[in-house]
Image: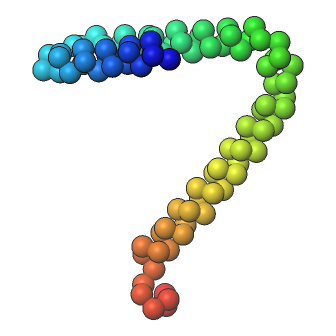
Amino acid sequence: MFTIIGIMFTGIAVGFIFRKRRIFYISHLITGLIWILLFLLGIEVGGNPQIMNHLYTLGAEALVLTLFCLAGSCVAAWGLWRMLYQPKGGKR
């Protein structure tokens, strides 16, 4: 845990030191590293029999959670829109 936090703060310090310099290749490097991390995550998930055996259940739970989050976001956005843009006095 402390190693991860230390690496993160080291990255922050390096970014702070080099903030005036423009490093053009850094976005391509970050994109490549993210692709590598996603690939390794896929290997770990595919190699875990417990996850693979319960993939249907996990997918169903993820779908239900996604639908409820979407519905809640829509209701909250609708309520905020009504609160901000409905004329005062309740008349349209």
Q: Residue placed farthest to the front in the image?
A: 2
| Residue shown at 56% from the left, 62% from the top | 76
| Residue shown at 50% from the left, 89% from the top | 90
Q: Position of residue 35 (x, y in %)?
A: 51, 13
Left of 15 or right of it: where is 76? Answer: right
Left of 1 or right of it: where is 69? Answer: right
| Camera-nearest residue between 82 and 47 | 47
Left of 5 or right of it: where is 45? Answer: right
Q: Position of residue 25 (x, y in %)?
A: 28, 10
Q: Is residue 28 above or below residue 77?
A: above
| Residue shown at 44% from the left, 12% from the top | 3
Residue 23 visible to the viewer: yes
Colour scheme in use? rainbow
Location of residue 12 by image quarter: top left
Q: Position of residue 46 (x, y in %)?
A: 74, 11
Q: Residue placed farthest to the right in the image?
A: 53
Location of residue 50 by image quarter: top right
Location of residue 10 by image quarter: top left
Q: Position of residue 92 (x, y in %)?
A: 49, 87
| Residue shown at 81% from the left, 37% from the top | 60
Q: Is residue 13 above or below residue 47?
A: below
